[in-house]
Image (cartoon, coloured by chain):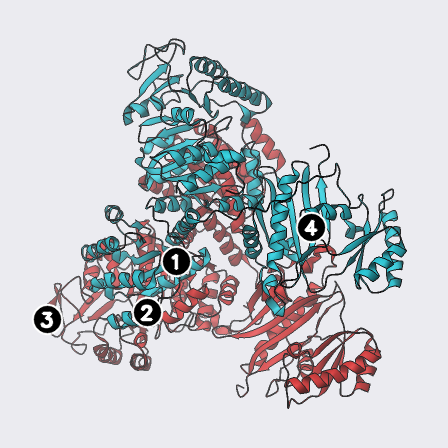
Chain colours: A red, B cyan
């Protein structure tokens, strides 16, 4: 893996303590209540009802029994050291209890108690004390201010959520990892209402210790969890989060994630809600994509993708074949597939011809409209499906049978045909879009089909399966290049110095010379060849064009001489006291495409590289691509090709195609440079970079390396 | 209304015959069957089961009774003239039956029979005969190849769809108008499964006569229909379609429409599926928006919007206030609102302060996070809702209570509080996002709330209500300007002639002169002022720049003279035989923004104007706006401001703001010109147009008027 520390490959060290949290053999409830509707009563009632096989140890100084179980007056009085404890007492008492439990050797605590970091400075201090005590004894903390968790297979219910009032989950392969308690339980409730099977649901609350990344990492190794559905407002610890995503990918466990705060409004709300750092949303997008995580836009989409993923069929290079009894629905599905970026290549001509011979008025291109005739002769379904798989070669097949797929007059005949199709092609992803009563839907699911009443929702979920497939199958990316060590100056260097530093990393500038006098400037211009560009040279003036410090198109010695004087004068009047080193004379690059390459330091993920085209593309259209540094040339080229304006580089409007390999080389080198430069580097702007026509390279025309003084 | 013929305001003439179709007092079934599962048996069985109050007249030459009803051997033998007839016999017999029925005076026929235009030329001819016979006697035809219709309130079931096997609709205010039979019944089935109330569902099939526009027009006047849900692959008759949309808007009946064929793949599928003209999707978008129709992207979205619309609360200038028990869900809702374009302004500071005093740890900005505390003290719900309406002034309020809103321990207290809130603010749109059992959901709905388990779906539907509100409240647009009559030449004119014709419509070109000799060109350049542009002048060379026929930046008499000769030579060698009239000398406009204005003739909607910025904006980013011609300056300005690149015109990147009023004037005039020019006009390209800085006008630099010869 390109950017992960070696340690990422090893399981998290805290595996055992986390297992005590997820699957304890014994659990103490501090603040146990005999009232099954109270915070300290709900977990006990739920565990009794669901047959938790471990030992439940209620702690309550005022009662001998709680809900029929022997109760103990204190942690000290417990007859054994519980693997885990649930803390259902106010904040102050929670601190005392955690200390006592940690000292006795309890490995994990689920802290329901509120009144910590979410309430302000005093609470944050109390939370820090809680954490310090736990860490001292190797205890893991879930929360505080957490709604808790459940492990459905174990019947372990360490939660007081009212969501359980309407029913418990079916045991199944989906694990839910959520920062938000209410939203995590919202996910669980929707999943339960749709009959989806869950392994566990964990909510991290204030994340003093255990965070969403830890949960993903644990679930990536949990045999009961095959699909991970995650929710987060902000990533607290990038290395553990990235290591967890990497582990999930290597274990072929799809991660579908809701990371809120996409919009500016949403980001502001995310910051006010928790102490999270929401980060830049486009950076989050890039990081999740890098690890094959599918980012869901809505709750429904998240659950749809998780549900389809439990089929464990992840087509590589996914394509969609559609079999429909309605031409209209076929068009609608085509629209949805295009919007989702899911290819629907046409059937081969010969296969189309063969199907027309079977059913004259069918439209066999793809969508394959087999018309309502197949409902009279269901054997046609098998015939058409056979052609879709064998001739069309589609990775996924969506069958739109609408209400006919649920009609008692049709279903008995249809179902047998569908089962035969499913059995014939076990490696294909088959999805039915039918409207049927719930028992019949369950029958179809037992037959190996996913069922989506709305075909548009099916398309979005099918597209996600291909993304998982591609991520699981992807070869490791090419390693980033190895560069000589980078030594940054103590403060932000001048343009010429910045270019010199970059050139040592193989990032080339346009031919240019620093000139201290007008005579030197003329000599340089004659040597470089006209036209030239003149730029004021001063470490005190970073944004030269804002003060008129750049003169383009200088065609002869006279204008170079005049230009030299003009720039001195402008600099002196605009930035009084600036140390002016002279003027930079550069050959003006003609015929190149103006690009911007940059690096900024993301508060969560560290140095992140950006690529975009110059001018309006970046400033008005925000048409840029991001990627976490460092990365190799293949990743850089993918970034370059991913922007909307990429056709400008590929030869649109009669241009010559640009030298994309040279541009990718520069971007990749920049990403390594940014990492090697260390925390002292605040950011880099290469603006503009000229991507010359194919084979002629790419050159930096202006460079700023921004240094955080004293950060080294 | 700007572009509708006067007649649009009157109800469609065919009202009576359409009523015979939708709500007949008597219906004959040609091909009546005693078997309730056959095409000729299903409608009878359904009407008997649902208590159709009219007279059912089975026609079957071989039986005395059908399903217990007296049957008649032929149309001639019927004891009365039925208002309507259902044709459930093969195509050939259908022709005979239609003729007999039309001659007896039956007003409407529902033709199930297939084998007409959808099968090829012979079928199309048969369909034409069917239509001619019906027209001759003033009979309206639904179909052929139609799945039919139902009118739920009447119990009239003129359909053989198997969708009825799983249940009949609840009677309610939503009418479904669908071109596709299978998809229309898919919509009905989903609506029924969700318990939505329907007035009717009509599917038009081949649309020999009655089309989706007719259905919308009828439903716009039907007292039982309050909300119209429509589906179409292509509009066949623009005037009746537009008149129907206009009528629906004036009657305050929301229309939500699925128009498939958005994507290129989808458009291709739409064309292969029916004989429809799918039209340009961006044009369809513009036309639907013009009439306040909301275009749904998915079936689910269409039904969500229709369901919420039955609340009949359409906020003008809609804003969203969110009350949530989960901060995470608040962020998610903010993201969804931003993506949907639904504003969520913050609560006033003073109101936020007041709420903080009520509940110290709430986050009262908007989303207003009232925390799970409100579930302990539900009176807080009323207090917070009061602040959202009175202080926040939001048109719509979304309350996210998730599973807590369905929990037996909470609901009894919560529901009373919600009812009081609903009663206090009857003009606001209240939506609950709760997870509850179906009976409780129905209770909430009876209390006046719409319920959406997924808050993101709620946001999309709420945004649509505001669009309906704005459309219903909109003042009539400013009328298009009145221009002098347009007379086009018989064939495509030269650039100079095109500009002269446009100038008569007040569309100004940059100052320029047509020059037949180099001497004239030099004199013109001296008079206009340098720099000038030289362009070859020939009606035979439309795309001058492709042959190097444009020379920019001519700075003096020598270059003008040389340029004149060069252009003559290039034209002669590139287009041998072209009639060359000379060279156009124009002042070069500096400091303007390059724009493209154009008109093309849409096959469905006639002349459609386009606006975009020059170069990559149009060619690579497809960043353009369309509008049906003609339109006034306000609509033109809205088009100009709607493109993504609009900041370029508004003064981004240190530019001077462009003269948008002048640009809007030109665009509006162009739209009137295009209509007045008549069918002979194939298209117009004004490319580039220079929008000069504010107050300095906008000028056409190059113009092509493309004429269809012989089309006048």
Q: CA distance from mark 1 to mark 3?
A: 53 Å
Name the image quarter holding residue A73.
bottom left
Q: On residue B686, which mark appears?
A: 4
Q: CA distance from mark 1 to mark 4?
A: 39 Å
Left or right: A517 in relation to A27: right
Q: Are marks 1 and 4 on the same chain?
A: yes
Where is mark 2, residue-wise?
A: B363
Q: CA distance from mark 3 to mark 4?
A: 88 Å
Q: In this picture, is B373 found above or below B674?
A: below
**Badge 4: chain ID:** B
Q: Quadrant of the N terminus of chain A?
A: bottom right
Q: Crowding near pointer 3: few (<14 within 10 Å), some, many (20+)?
A: some
Q: On residue B319, which mark appears?
A: 1
Where is mark 3, residue-wise?
A: A63
Q: Residue at x 74, y 38 (%)?
A: B489
Q: Nearer the viewer, mark 3 or mark 2?
A: 2
Q: Crowding near pointer 4: few (<14 within 10 Å), some, many (20+)?
A: many
């Amino acid at each position: 893996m390109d950017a992960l520390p070696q340690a990422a490959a090893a399981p998290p060290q805290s595996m055992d303590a986390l297992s005590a949290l997820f699957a304890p053999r014994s659990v103490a409830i501090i603040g146990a209540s005999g009232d099954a509707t109270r915070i300290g009563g709900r977990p006990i009632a739920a565990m009794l009802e669901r047959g938790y096989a471990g030992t439940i140890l209620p702690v309550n100084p005022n009662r001998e029994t709680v809900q029929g179980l022997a109760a103990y007056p204190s942690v000290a009085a417990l007859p054994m050291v519980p693997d885990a404890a649930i803390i259902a007492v106010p904040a102050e008492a929670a601190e005392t209890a955690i200390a006592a439990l940690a000292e006795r050797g309890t490995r994990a605590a689920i802290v329901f108690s509120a009144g910590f970091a979410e309430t302000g400075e005093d609470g944050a201090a109390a939370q820090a004390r809680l954490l310090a005590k736990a860490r001292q004894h190797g205890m893991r903390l879930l929360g505080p201010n957490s709604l808790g968790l459940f492990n459905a297979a174990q019947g372990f219910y360490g939660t007081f959520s009212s969501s359980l009032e309407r029913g418990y989950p079916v045991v199944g392969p989906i694990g839910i990892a959520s920062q938000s308690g209410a939203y995590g339980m919202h996910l669980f409730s929707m999943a339960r209402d749709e009959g989806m099977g869950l392994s566990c649901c964990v909510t991290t609350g204030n994340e003093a210790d255990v965070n969403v990344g830890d949960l993903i990492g644990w679930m990536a190794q949990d045999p009961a969890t095959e699909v991970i559905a995650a929710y987060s407002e902000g990533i607290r610890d990038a290395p553990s989060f990235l290591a967890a995503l990497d582990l999930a990918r290597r274990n072929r466990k799809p991660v579908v994630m809701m990371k809120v705060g996409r919009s500016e409004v949403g980001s502001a709300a995310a910051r006010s809600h928790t102490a999270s750092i929401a980060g830049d949303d486009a950076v989050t997008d890039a990081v999740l994509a890098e690890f094959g995580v599918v980012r869901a836009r809505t709750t429904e989409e998240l659950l749809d993708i998780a549900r389809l993923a439990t089929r464990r069929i992840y087509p590589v290079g996914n394509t969609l074949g559609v079999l429909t009894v309605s031409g209209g629905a076929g068009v609608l599905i085509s629209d949805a597939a295009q919007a989702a970026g899911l290819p629907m290549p046409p059937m081969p001509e010969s296969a189309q011809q063969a199907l027309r011979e079977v059913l004259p008025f069918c439209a066999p291109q793809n969508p394959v409209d087999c018309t309502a005739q197949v409902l009279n002769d269901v054997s046609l379904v098998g015939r058409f499906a056979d052609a879709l798989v064998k001739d069309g070669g589609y990775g996924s097949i969506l069958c739109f049978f609408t209400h006919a797929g649920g009609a008692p007059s049709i279903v008995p005949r249809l179902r047998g045909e569908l089962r035969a199709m499913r059995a014939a092609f076990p490696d294909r992803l088959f999805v039915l879009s039918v409207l049927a009563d719930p028992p019949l839907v369950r029958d179809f699911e037992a037959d190996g089909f996913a069922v989506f009443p709305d075909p548009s929702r099916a398309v979005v979920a099918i597209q996600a399966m291909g993304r998982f497939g591609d991520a699981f199958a992807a070869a490791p990316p090419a390693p980033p290049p190895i560069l000589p060590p980078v030594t940054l100056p103590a403060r932000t260097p001048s343009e010429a110095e910045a270019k010199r530093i970059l050139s040592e990393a193989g990032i080339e500038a346009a031919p240019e010379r620093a000139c201290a006098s007008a005579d030197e400037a003329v000599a340089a211009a004659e040597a470089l060849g006209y036209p030239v560009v003149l730029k004021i040279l001063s470490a005190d003036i970073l944004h030269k064009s804002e003060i008129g410090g750049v003169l383009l198109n200088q065609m002869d010695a006279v204008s170079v001489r005049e230009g030299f004087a003009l720039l001195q004068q402008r600099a002196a009047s605009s930035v009084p006291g600036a140390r002016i080193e002279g003027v930079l004379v550069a050959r003006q690059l003609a015929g190149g495409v103006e690009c911007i390459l940059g690096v900024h330091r993301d508060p969560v993920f560290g140095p992140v590289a950006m690529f975009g085209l110059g001018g309006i593309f970046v400033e008005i259209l925000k048409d840029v691509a991001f990627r976490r540094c460092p990365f190799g040339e293949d990743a850089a080229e993918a970034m370059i090709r991913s922007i909307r304006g990429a056709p400008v580089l590929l030869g649109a409007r009669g241009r010559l195609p640009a030298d994309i390999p040279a541009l990718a080389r520069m971007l990749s080198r920049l990403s390594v440079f940014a990492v090697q430069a260390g925390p002292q580097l605040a950011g880099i702007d290469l603006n503009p970079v000229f991507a010359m026509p194919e084979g002629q390279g790419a050159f930096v025309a202006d460079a700023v390396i921004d240094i955080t003084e004293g950060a080294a």
